[in-house]
Image: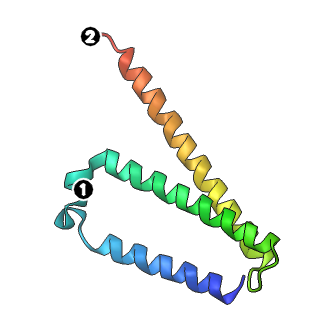
Amino acid sequence: MAITSIESVLQQMRALTQAADRPATASGELASGGFAGELKKSLDRISDAQQSASSQAEAFELGKPGIALNDVMVDLQKAGIGFQMGLQVRNKMVAAYQEIMNMPA
């Protein structure tokens, strides 16, 4: 992996650590957004990852300097895994909804 990729991963880990250290209710994120807000944030992150991977792949295909094939492939795989995770969450939510709707009143 390139040095820039490693630095990017380290920055993401630091940001996640900082986000985990501060309470969510203090900033009002959890109180105002709830489950729907968190779901929207997750879908936005999945979309951003896919767009980023796509633009990086396009830049590699055009031969722009500084873009390595292994970085492109890793980012495409990350985006694919994120999409599959989102799809599985959706499937579980639909199954739970159907189960609730089939409960006797």
Q: Could you tell whether 17 is left or right of 58 in the image?
A: left
Where does residue 96 sit, x and y in percent of width and height?
A: 42, 29
Q: Secondary structure at mark 2?
A: loop
Corner quadrant of residue 87: top right
Q: Secondary structure at mark 1?
A: helix
The image quadrant where one finds the N terminus is bottom right
Please identify the residue farthest to the bottom as the structure is shown. Answer: 3
Where does residue 74 sit, x and y in percent of width and height?
A: 71, 68
Residue 30 circle label: 1
> At 23% from the left edge and 68% from the top edge, which residue is drawn?
23
Corner quadrant of residue 31: bottom left
Please identify the residue farthest to the top as the structure is shown. Answer: 104
Residue 55 circle label: none
The image quadrant where one finds the C terminus is top left
> At 74% from the left edge and 67% from the top edge, which residue is drawn?
57
Colour mapping: rainbow
> At 25% from the left edge and 64% from the top edge, which residue is drawn?
24
Q: Nearer the viewer, residue 43 or 102?
A: 43
Q: On screen, 1 above or below 61?
A: below
Among numbered discs 2 and 1, the one appearing first in the sequence = 1
**Other-residue count near label 1 (Cα within 10 Å), few / some / many at <14 / 14–19 / ≥20:** some
Query: Distance between the Cα atoms at labels 2 and 1?
Result: 31 Å
**Other-residue count near label 2 (Cα within 10 Å), few / some / many at <14 / 14–19 / ≥20:** few
Please identify the residue farthest to the front as the structure is shown. Answer: 62
Residue bearing mark 2: 105
Q: Nearer the viewer, residue 51 or 85?
A: 51
Q: Amino acid at mark 1?
A: Leu
Q: On screen, 65 above or below 49?
A: below
> At 56% from the left edge and 78% from the top edge, which residue is drawn?
9
Q: Nearer the viewer, residue 17 or 43?
A: 43
The answer to whether the residue labelled 2 contacts the one labelled 1, judged by CB atoms less than 8 Å apart, is no
